Amino acid sequence: MTLPAVTFSHDQAEAFDRIAETLRGAGIDLENGTTQPLQEGRSRVLAVIGKAGSGKTLLLSELARAAEAAGLALVSGDYEPKRAKDARSIAILAPTNKAASVLRLRGVPATTIHRILYTPVYDPEYEKIAEWLEGRGEKPEIEGLTEEALDRAKLSYETHRSVPAALAMAGLRGSDFITGWKRRDDPLDLGFVDEASMLDEKQFNDLREIFPNLVLFGDPAQLAPVGQSGQMVFESLPEPARLELSRVHRQDADNPILDLAHALADPQVDFYRFERMIEEAAARDERVVWASRVESDLMARSPVLVWRNATRIRLIHAFRNVHGAPEDALLPGEPLICDGIELPLKHRKKRLDLEARGLIKGAQVIYLGPGSKPGFSRLHVVGAENPQVSAASIVKIERPEEEEPFIPFAARMGATFLHGAAVTIHKAQGSQWSDVQVFAPDIYAAFRAGRTEAGQPMWKRLAYVAITRAEQRLLWVTRARLAKPAGPLGVEDLRALRKSAPLELSAQEE
């Protein structure tokens, strides 16, 4: 086989060939760049598993590039054109907005699983622009849009390959061109799923119903979804369907964070020895920090990772106190985590509107200020392609030793949020931040508890997931102390990321 123009390790090359062989049986020939019409028949599921640094993302990227070169149309979740009956398609998925944005930053056009389950319905007038952007029609004439606006849209699409982002650059809002959302009726074709360790059985079964050809990419050393007895969905696949990447790539070999992550596999390494390794790494490399206190400035954009909920709540309370946040209001710049949407069934369309803009359970959000209506908040959805949104909000602030959360303000219904200055390591899976603080006393508590998951000490799985969330710098926090902030909370760093005017999403009863 002629491999892509990258340097693959032996195990990557073998996995590429095995996947290509399987797809050839499904009528997708990556070697010759050709396809045959989709034939109904047995489903094909493969899994590529490997620890951090083993090259899963590179392999996914090259497979996706080869599939598109073979003529498979990319299904992005933000706009889905009408395809010919015999056309083949590919979708690249991640369980969360943050995980999808990590892939997009690496040049992989990913979307969330949720966005594939529900598809947007475009106004026919603006659908002409989408067809032109994708090269399937002439440049349209649209009332109210100038030639310059359309040219801006074209340039944006060529850069980001996102129809909504391109239309936003033309001065349109989502409510202008999207008339509604509908549950997907027809199956798709080939799906690549990153962060597959986060999938539960229901999500896996939903994906198998939609995609007759499915390739999962996951890390077996991470934490399994809650309620799955420590097992990940790809572990139930037969041995030939699991392709393992074991080599850590040369370009990552000098990364002290990955070195520490892989050291956890050594059964001789207990918590005490692991902490000595961290201290030694910190002495020779600035990418590892032996920290005696939590940095409150980092908490505003990168949550402290903890094991226990009680620790999470205490750190959030300390963060709000040190910034002088009032009990009855949020300060612009405070981080939030979406905890779901509280809407009755009759408001299904409004729920889909909120979820389509990234407000799904687990999404990281920054509070920008009050909205234009009572109970509304202006929000920045971290990792979303169009991050600015205004939505009816229910904000819950948990406080130490109190069972019920305090609600500083709330709409009658809408998107619900918890504070996000600290999150559990379970909820952090799939996300990455430049700088990550890990609260070591909680890892030690897990070590002392002696719990295991799937035959591995729980503290090692927690430590592995936590430290591999760090892209550039790991701060190992050894004490329950909080440093004073260098300045007040703010949102200036988010202004440059604004792509369009925020979309007002009403979640109130009419």
Image: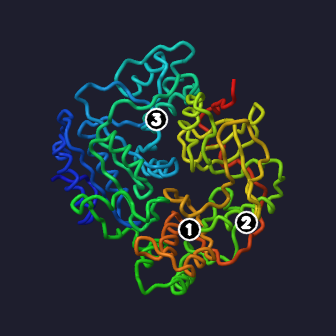
User: Distance of mark 2 from mark 3, alpha carbons?
Assistant: 40 Å
Which one is earlier in the sequence, the residue at label 1 or at label 3? 3
Per the image, the residue denoted by label 3 is 162
Q: For mark 1, give the secondary structure.
A: strand
Q: Position of residue 153 (x, y in %)?
A: 49, 28
Residue at the image position 17 percent from the left and 45 percent from the top: 24
Looking at the image, residue 196 lies above or below residue 437: above
Query: Which sits in the foreground, 279 or 231?
Result: 231
Amino acid under label 1? Arg
Give, as a three-letter code, the residue at label 2. Answer: Arg
Quarter assignment of residue 352 = top right
> Cα distance, mark 1 to mark 3?
31 Å
Q: Residue 507, how many percent across, how many down?
A: 66, 32
Q: Amino acid at mark 3?
A: Ser
**Mark 1 / mark 2, whichever is N-terminal:** 2
Tell me what residue is drawn at x 59 percent, y 68 percent. Answer: 307
Q: Nearer the viewer, mark 1 or mark 2?
A: 2
| Residue picked out by circle 2 | 314
Mark number displayed over residue 473:
1
Q: Secondary structure at mark 2?
A: helix
